[in-house]
């Protein structure tokens, strides 16, 4: 029988027969478990509390409060607490009824030590997962400031938060680079919300979604009668954003004919509505976002080089989700909590198998795709394999296993600030094995040591 690590967890074992109680305690302790033996339910209740770090195993027949009443009290106090009942021969039907009332499992007397340990292992696995989810949710709820907005523990995302806070206080225009779904608009909003412009408008324009025929009017505004259908004056997005922030998403999609007009606005910080000769001063910060390399597009005459250099005063590159897999559990839990609130549902428990499956994906849609999967999970739309039906694992089994193993090692090094010896002990593998895996996966332990706080316009990846 394999011994597992349940450090900090306990088995609360209730049995009035001293011999049975002692034998069960020895069997569980030999299996590496911490045991609290109790002779009565009243004694056991003194140890129970919400989020008790363990499980409850109780004989049904007890003096005073019996096992069924103890089950009722324990489950009322904490519905997620695994309670295992020990029944005598012929009480199986009663035990099945107790499971309908919230019991996790039952064991029939006489039972073997192996059966007791195996049932305890399964219950402790479930309990540990519940407590980890509670702790994760508490961490998310207790986050403040930028950590509540830009979620993740990885070095890459920590550097993004650092750069955002640094650039938010500056007046320079900013270019945000990143694949589709990496959260460019979220970063733009954070740059606005943590700046002195936070009390003014944040105006977002998707340059790829506006038809060219109305783009100029939307951006610059127009006077009444400026063109057919202009029945009244319209304030353009640029003018409306004055005092605040103008966010131009998918800037690479902006028509070339309009790029020169935008360049003039950026250089002179003034705008003219269509059909007007009046120059209107504006005070705004421009944040542009793109998934393409604008320098290459400029060399191909598909984007104005002068506009590229004007926008690229400061730049911020967002990592793809596959480059920060260790953030997936925290992000997924964050999106599940948001989805549960949005749909008025109870947040479901997230199993370890689902997390493993999620961490094995390539995530071409990045964080946006993960958020959609979290919504489907909240709505109960995942298939029996705990996998989104529209998602398929990419790469061979060996490649998926390697990717998951690498993420676990990196997470261990991050928690232990790059201490390889401590990480080997935490992962329960020989030190030489860990060094071999660091070499295999090209992981540099040094990068997980105490982060520097030097400012930079471009986060490390």
Image (tube, helix red, strand yellow):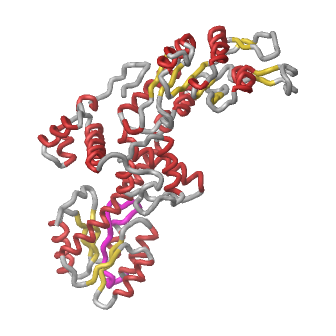
Q: Magenta stretch: dominant SS?
A: loop
Query: Which quadrant of the figure contains the N terminus?
Result: bottom left
- Magenta span contains residue 52: yes
- Magenta span contains residue 446: no
Q: Which of 425 and 293 is in front in this view?
A: 293
Residue 432 drawn above or below residue 279: below
Q: Which of 21 and 392 is in front in this view?
A: 392
Residue 344 drawn above or below residue 66: above
Image-quadrant location for residue 440 = top left
Query: Which x, y percent locates residue 127?
Result: 35, 62
- Side of 349 where 270 appears, left or right: right
Q: Give the range drawn in magenta.
A: 47-65
The reply to whether residue 285 is in sight is yes
Q: Nearer the viewer, residue 146 or 349?
A: 349
Residue at image point 37% right, 25% down: 460
Picture mark count:
0
């Amino acid at each position: 029988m394999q011994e597992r690590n349940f450090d900090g967890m306990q088995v609360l074992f209730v049995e009035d027969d001293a011999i049975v109680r002692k034998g069960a305690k020895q069997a569980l302790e030999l299996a590496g478990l911490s045991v609290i033996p109790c002779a009565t339910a009243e004694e056991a209740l003194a140890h129970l509390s919400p989020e008790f770090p363990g499980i409850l195993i109780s004989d049904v027949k007890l003096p005073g409060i019996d096992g069924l009443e103890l089950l009722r009290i324990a489950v009322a106090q904490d519905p997620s607490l695994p309670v295992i009942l020990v029944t005598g021969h012929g009480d199986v039907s009663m035990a099945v009824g107790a499971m309908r009332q919230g019991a996790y499992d039952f064991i029939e007397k006489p039972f073997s030590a192996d059966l007791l340990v195996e049932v305890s292992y399964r219950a402790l696995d479930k309990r540990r997962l519940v407590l980890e989810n509670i702790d994760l949710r508490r961490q998310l709820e207790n986050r403040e400031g930028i950590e509540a907005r830009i979620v993740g523990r990885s070095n890459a995302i920590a550097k993004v938060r650092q750069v955002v806070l640094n650039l938010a206080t500056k007046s320079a225009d900013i270019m945000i680079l990143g694949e589709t779904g990496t959260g460019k608009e979220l970063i733009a909003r954070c740059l606005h919300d943590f700046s002195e412009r936070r009390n003014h408008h944040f105006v977002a324009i998707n340059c790829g979604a506006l038809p060219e025929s109305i783009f100029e009017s939307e951006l610059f505004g127009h006077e009444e009668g400026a063109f057919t259908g202009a029945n009244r004056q319209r304030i353009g997005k640029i003018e409306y954003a004055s005092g605040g922030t103008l966010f131009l998403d998918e800037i690479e999609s902006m028509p070339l004919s309009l790029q020169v007009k935008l360049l003039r606005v950026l250089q002179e910080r003034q705008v003219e509505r269509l059909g007007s000769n009046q120059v209107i001063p504006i005070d705004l910060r421009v944040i542009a976002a793109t998934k393409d390399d604008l320098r290459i597009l400029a060399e191909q005459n598909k984007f104005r080089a002068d506009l590229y250099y004007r926008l690229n005063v400061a730049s911020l590159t967002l990592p793809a989700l596959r480059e920060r897999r260790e953030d997936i559990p925290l992000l997924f839990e964050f999106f599940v909590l948001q989805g549960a609130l949005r749909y008025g549902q109870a947040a479901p428990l997230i199993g370890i198998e689902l997390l493993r499956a999620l961490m094995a994906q390539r995530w071409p849609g990045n964080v946006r795709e993960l958020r959609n999967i979290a919504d489907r999970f909240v709505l109960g739309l995942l298939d029996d394999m705990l996998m989104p039906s529209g998602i398929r694992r990419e790469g061979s089994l060996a490649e998926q296993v390697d990717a998951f193993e690498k993420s676990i090692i990196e997470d261990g090094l991050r928690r232990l600030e790059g201490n390889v010896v401590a990480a080997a002990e935490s992962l329960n593998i020989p030190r030489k094995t860990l060094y071999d895996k660091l070499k295999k996966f090209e992981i540099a332990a040094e990068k997980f040591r105490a982060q520097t706080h030097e400012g930079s316009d471009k986060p490390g990846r």
